[in-house]
C-alpha cells in the first residue's frame, strides 16, 4: 500500500493548508484506522473501549474532529471542500471505523446556545454523540408520511411514535426525532432533541445487518414522551428545511465515502493484478481483468468531479434546493458505481476476494447499503427528475 499521496490525489487549486489537511487525514487513516480493520471484522464491528478512546484521542490530536462546526464549539470550521478531502480518506477504511472520530449531525448547528453547550460541544470532544430518528415502518425520506406526532401538553410536547434504523441510537447521548406537531388541522414537521433515558423512550429491537459497523441501528419507540419547549431545535414547523440540509450533507457524505472506497479498492486490486501471475502472464495482461479495472477507474474519476462540484456549490452559496438535487446526483452515481467497483475487485482477487480478511469482500457488503440509506437510489432519481421539471435542464446538469 502506498504511503505517499500521488499527484492525482490533489485537486487543482488546493492551498498549502488544504493539502496539509489531506495529508493529516491520510496519515490518520493509514496509521490508526486501517490496522484495526480485521480486528473489527472479527468482533462484529466492535472494538475494546480503550481502542475507541485511542482513536478519539488521535483524531482530536490530528484536528479531524467536528469538521464543519465552528472552532468556538470545538470544531474545525472547514469549508465543504475541506470536509470532502477528509471524508474521502475516511471512506478508504472498512468497518465504519471513522464513526469513532468525534463529530455530530449538521442539525445541531441550528441549536440554541443551551442546546449547543449541552449536546454539540461534548460530542466534538468525544463524550457522546447524536442519532437521527426519522425513518418509520411506513415512512422514510418524505416528512409528509411521518406518523410520529407531538401534541402540545403541559407547556411542552407529548411525543408518540416509533422510529426504525436509528443509526448509532444504541450509543447516542441525544436522539434527533422528527415528529409532526399537531396544531388544529395542521401537522408541522418539527425536530426534537430527546435524551434516550427520558421516560417513555423504549428500545424495541436492535437488528443485525449485513455490515459490521461500530454502532447499531435500533428500533426505538416513543410512548407519551414529555419534553419541554427547549427540546425543539430550529423552531416548530421547520423540520422539513432542517432535514433537507441534513439529507444534502449526508448524501454528499455517502458519495465522498464511496469515492474513498473506490480509491482503496482500485489500489488493492490493481496491485494484485500487476503482481499476480497466471499462465505465465500477469492478470493485468488479461483484458477480462484490466478492462473492468479501467471502467472502475473511470467511474471513480467522474464521481470525484461531480462530488467536488457539489462541494464547490455549497461553498459558493448556491441555492440550497439546487444543491439538494446535485447531492442526490452524487449519491446516486457514486453509490451505484462503488457497488460495481467492489464486485469487480472481488472478481479480480478470485477466491481470495471472497475472504472476510480481504478489503474487497468487506466493501462488497458495506457499500450495498449506500443505495438504500439516506434515501434509496429511486428516491434520488425522483429528486433529480423533479429538479429537471422545476429548475430546468441547464441548471440541473451544469
Image (cartoon, grey):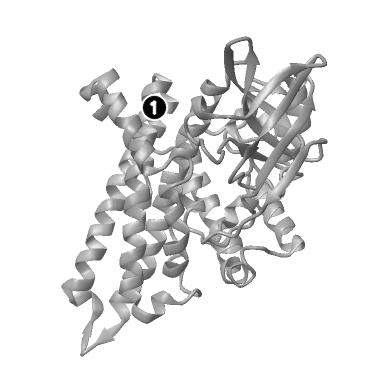
Query: Relative to 139, is 337 on the left or the right?
Result: left
- Extreme residue toward the front, this view: 185
The residue lying at 27 percent from left, 46 percent from top is 302
Residue 55, above or below 20: below
- Front residue of 103/63: it is 103
Work out whether residue 323 can be spotted: yes
Q: Which image quarter: residue 148?
A: top right
Whole-percent x, y for residue 274 in the image = 29, 76
Which quarter of the rendered picture does the C terminus lie within? top left
- Extreme residue toward the left, this view: 287
Query: Relative to 55, is 352 on the left or the right?
Result: left
Whole-percent x, y for residue 144 in the image = 50, 24
Local SS, label 1: helix
Query: Relative to 133, is 388 on the left or the right?
Result: left
Q: Which image quarter: residue 325?
A: top left
Q: Which residue is mark 1?
A: 323
Q: Which image quarter: residue 199?
A: top right
Whole-percent x, y for residue 296 in the image = 28, 58
- Front residue of 349/187: it is 187
Amino acid at each position: 500500500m502506498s504511503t505517499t499521496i500521488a499527484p492525482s490525489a490533489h485537486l487543482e487549486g488546493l492551498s498549502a493548508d488544504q493539502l496539509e489537511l489531506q495529508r493529516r487525514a491520510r496519515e490518520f487513516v493509514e496509521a490508526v484506522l486501517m490496522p484495526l480493520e480485521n480486528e473489527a471484522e472479527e468482533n462484529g464491528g466492535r472494538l475494546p473501549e480503550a481502542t475507541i478512546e485511542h482513536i478519539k484521542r488521535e483524531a482530536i490530536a490530528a484536528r479531524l474532529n467536528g469538521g464543519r462546526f465552528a472552532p468556538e464549539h470545538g470544531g474545525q470550521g472547514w469549508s465543504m471542500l475541506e470536509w470532502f478531502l477528509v471524508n474521502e480518506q475516511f471512506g478508504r477504511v472498512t468497518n465504519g471505523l471513522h464513526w469513532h472520530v468525534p463529530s455530530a449531525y449538521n442539525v445541531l448547528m441550528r441549536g440554541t446556545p443551551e442546546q449547543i453547550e449541552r449536546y454539540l460541544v461534548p460530542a466534538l470532544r468525544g463524550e457522546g454523540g447524536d442519532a437521527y430518528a426519522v425513518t418509520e415502518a411506513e415512512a422514510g425520506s418524505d416528512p409528509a408520511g411521518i406518523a410520529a406526532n407531538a401534541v402540545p401538553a403541559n407547556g411542552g410536547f407529548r411525543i408518540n411514535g416509533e422510529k426504525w434504523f436509528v443509526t448509532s441510537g444504541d450509543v447516542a447521548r441525544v436522539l434527533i426525532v422528527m415528529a409532526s406537531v399537531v396544531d388544529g388541522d395542521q401537522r408541522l414537521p418539527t425536530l426534537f432533541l430527546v435524551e434516550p433515558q427520558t421516560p417513555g423512550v423504549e428500545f424495541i429491537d436492535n437488528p443485525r445487518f449485513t455490515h459490521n459497523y461500530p454502532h447499531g441501528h435500533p428500533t426505538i419507540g416513543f410512548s407519551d414522551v414529555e419534553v419541554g419547549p427547549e427540546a425543539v431545535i430550529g423552531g416548530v414547523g421547520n423540520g422539513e428545511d432542517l432535514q433537507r440540509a441534513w439529507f444534502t450533507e449526508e448524501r454528499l457524505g455517502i458519495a465522498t465515502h464511496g469515492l474513498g472506497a473506490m480509491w482503496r479498492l482500485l489500489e488493492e486490486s490493481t496491485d494484485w493484478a500487476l503482481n499476480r501471475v497466471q499462465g505465465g502472464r500477469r492478470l493485468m495482461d488479461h483484458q477480462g481483468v484490466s478492462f473492468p479495472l479501467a471502467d472502475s477507474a473511470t467511474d471513480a474519476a467522474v464521481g470525484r468531479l461531480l462530488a467536488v462540484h457539489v462541494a464547490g456549490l455549497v461553498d459558493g452559496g448556491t441555492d440550497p434546493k439546487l444543491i439538494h438535487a446535485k447531492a442526490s446526483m452524487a449519491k446516486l452515481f457514486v453509490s451505484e458505481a462503488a457497488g460495481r467497483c467492489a464486485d469487480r475487485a472481488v472478481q479480480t482477487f478470485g477466491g481470495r476476494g471472497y475472504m472476510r480478511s480481504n478489503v474487497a469482500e468487506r466493501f462488497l457488503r458495506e457499500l450495498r447499503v449506500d443505495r438504500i440509506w439516506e434515501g434509496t437510489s429511486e428516491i434520488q432519481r425522483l429528486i433529480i427528475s423533479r429538479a429537471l421539471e422545476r429548475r430546468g435542464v441547464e441548471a440541473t446538469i451544469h
